[in-house]
Amino acid sequence: MVLDITQIGNPVLREICEEVPEDVLEQDDFQAFIDDLIETKRHANGAGIAAPQVGEPFRIFVVEVKNNPRYPYKPEAELTICVNPKITFLTDERFENYEGCLSIPDLRGKVPRCPHIRVEALDRHGKAFTREVKGITAGTFQHEFDHIDGILFPDRVTDPHTLSTWNEFKERHEDGVRVEVEAIVAKWGE
């Protein structure tokens, strides 16, 4: 089922979310919620989505990029479900990532992101996993992780002059972003 996406101004987007207890994670209704979260992300052409973006203050998000018309320049990323995640930065380097958000329609802006991170989380069945993520995809994981800590991408924009509407981004910035993304992928992968 496609869920309603909460929009900026909704207080749930500013909450530090609660960890998902393992006994809750195992419940059929929570597994159905995970399926709905994935379906909602795909329906909205998001690169990822976090539980508070559909009104639920839980520490869970999903990331996936496949032939995404909203982000045609992003490399593909396999479906990853992160429950109670932790992220560790593995380099002091940063890159500027032009980001948008399903909860903030029609706004884009540049955010500094770490190009090499370690993600530690539970999968949807409660199995712990660790994964290193690099490049643009690392930025996507950080964006979604911010959501479960009540942080929205405009909070991280260091230069407000980079803010633009979706149409202005496509007309004035997308070609340059493609080149930047290619350079990041060439250096870091993903």
Image: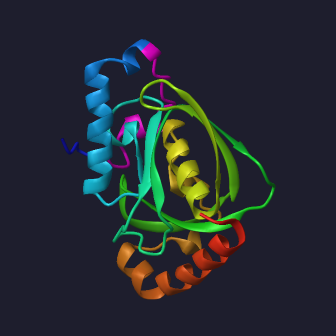
In the picture provided, is 40 more to the left or to the right than 147?
Answer: left
Whether residue 85 appears in this view of the structure is no
Residue at x-position 55% and y-position 44%: 146
- Count the numbered circles shown: 0
> How far across and down, in percent of the image, does residue 41 sit?
32, 51
Residue 6 highlighted magenta (yes or no): yes
Does the rendering let one see residue 190?
Answer: yes
In the displayed structure, 185 sits above or below 83; it is below
Task: Say above or below: 108 vs 149.
Answer: below
Image quarter of residue 88: top right
Tell me the magenta residue range: 5-22
Q: Position of residue 43 (x, y in %)?
A: 25, 55
Q: Answer above or below: position of 61 versus 173.
A: above
Q: Residue at x 36, y 52 (%)?
A: 103
| Residue name at image x 50 percent, y 23 percent | 19
Q: Which SS type dominates the magenta stretch?
A: loop
Q: Is residue 118 above or below residue 175?
A: above
Between 34 and 97, the one lying in front of the other is 34
Assign the C terminus to one quadrant of the image. Answer: bottom right
Q: Residue furthest right?
A: 92
Which percent across, then down, holds residue 53? 36, 43
- The stretch drawn in magenta includes residue 19: yes
